[in-house]
Amino acid sequence: MKTIHSPALRIGVAALTVFLLSAPLAAAGFVNFLTNPGLETFNAPYGYYNGYELRVAQHWTAFTKSGVTPKYMTNDEWAAMTGGAAEHLEGDHSQMYWETGAFAAGIYQQVSVTPGTDYAAQAKILSIWETSATRTDGKMLKQVGIDPHGGTDPNSPDIVWGPTKGSDVKWESVRTSATAISSTITLFVLVTSEASSSPSLRNQVFVDAVVLTKAPAASATSPSFSRNLSFTVGWSGTPAYSGNSLEYDVEYKVDDGSWSFWKGKTSSTSATFGPTSPTTVEYCRTYHFRARAWEDYGYYGSVKVKLPGVFAEGDGDASTLVGGICGHVQSNWAGPIGGATVVISGTASSTTTDSSGHYALPLPDAGSYEVTAGRSGYGSPPGIAIDVYSTTTTIPLTFTLRPPDDVVVNGDFEGDLNGWTTTGSTPTVVTSPLRSGDYSLAMSGISGMTQTHSVAAMHEPILSFWYKIATGETNGDDSFKACLYQNDPSVCAATFTITPTANVDWTHQWLALGLDGVYTGPVGIYFNLQQDGSEPTTVYLDEVSLGQGPYKIYLPLTVKEYGG
């Protein structure tokens, strides 16, 4: 015998009942790939609750993702059991399920599709937390997901879940879209419910009017390169069914960052990106764009169907590199220097580095220029020469400022070897390749060079230099060594050694003498190249300095004594 439960269990939401009015049908050719999408027919009972039938809609399978397993019913069976309304949106029935404990559960259906095709899904779900007498949003979260591989595990990481909605006592549309990877995909309809605060009250779910159909296609376009901090981005799309209208979502990301929202459901097909909206555009950065379309399919029964397409993965649909001169200004120990001024000669273009030492400047017109960097309290290296062509996109430049107490003589090798003592093959001052200024130094064969100084109260002496290697060596028989010593070049306090087997572009390197506090006494620099002679190796040097390193701050040590 069927019984009606106490009034506290009656949902009494007559106001929620939707009267089916005549509505336009979806566009010609529209296909809902689901079987029994309106949840009108049901399997034979799989059990009973207090004499009332527990049933799942035909062609659908109940699943539990976590928590307790809900009890599945037809909407009218629920109404008969509780005296409440038989909630539904189209046809006569909906899939109803309920439970008093916490659950994440729902129904799924596997569908045969075409691999590589985009599909979109929508489900109408009504959730009621305990009773319709009160509204408690956020307690029951509605969601749909597509497994593009056709799997049936609701915990699979392959499932593309759409956004959740959590309004209580309200029919809501939840959506998702995905690209089919196999010939079968699986649509999951999921509600996640917290435990009821009272065991006498039931958390209820009604599912109706589920749609799975082809998704619209869309893509974004942008210039591959821009010299300006603003440029035009466009987008366009193709509806899944001819004649349907489209709107667009557009996202962007900077370099390898995460995707950010820009435009939502816009009917426009282009917009200006930058210079400060939707983000501050910077030189030497790459901006990626992707778009997806929203297609208005009209009505399926009495339910409006509007579904999104699929965003492109990876770097999206289009990318724009904003050209410029950019890089960092650093100290002799590669620490960032904020507040440094970077200037392009012959132009009005200059900027100041941020706290990380980063700077960015626009590309000047085609021509030859010199870029310099400086800051109060540091020595400036010679300017770096650059050539800008019509095809130039970016020029990365890093500057290493000298310590204020630099003791090296002729560390830039500007024209001669003054200040250096050489052994073996005499290094050559060259005009190419250049790191900065007008000259660099080239070491080849078996060659050595030293410079020794006596310093007073120098805090943690640091050797800093830039080097470049050009070699035909593949066997690792050659060796280049940089040494920082106190008294004897053969006894290094700090050593950098590299075995050339490939070319190395200009690279900064630094060595610390390894003494705490300040140092007074002799300190020397030794560079040495050992070449076996079978394959040529040349090591280029520039911007050699020797001066103070980073200061360490020692905090007083406090020992607290505990009494017994």
Image: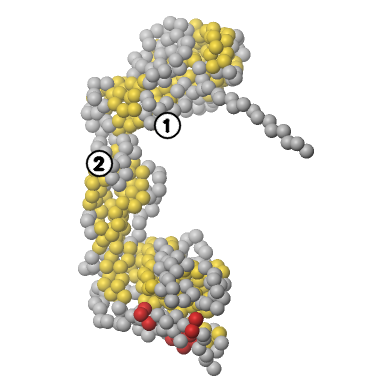
Q: Quadrant of residue 352?
A: top left
Q: Amino acid at mark 1?
A: Ser
The numbered dot on residue 230 is: 2
User: What residue is at 41 percent from the left and 65 percent from the top?
Assistant: 165
Q: Is residue 458 visible?
A: yes
Amino acid carrying label 2: it is Ser
User: Label 1, on which residue?
Assistant: 356
Q: Quadrant of residue 322?
A: top left
Mark with earlier residue (2, 1): 2
Vertical placement of residue 118 versus 235, above or below: below
Write the residue at 35% across / 80% down. 15
Q: Are marks 2 and 1 in contact (CB under 8 Å)?
A: no
User: In front here: 502 or 2?
Assistant: 2
Question: Is the residue 193 above or below the residue 456 in the image?
Answer: below
Q: How many marks?
A: 2
Q: Which residue is found at the position 45% from the left and 17% from the top?
A: 403
Query: Which mark, by number, is residue 22?
Result: none
Picture coordinates of residue 219, whole percent (x, y):
29, 55
Q: Secondary structure at mark 1?
A: loop
Characterize the local packing of mark 1: few (<14), some (14-19) or many (20 or more) Cα atoms within 10 angstroms: some
Location of residue 547 in the rendering, given as x and y in whole percent from the top left corner: 49, 15
Where is residue 432 drawn, in percent x and y?
A: 36, 18
Q: Is residue 48 above or below residue 511?
A: below
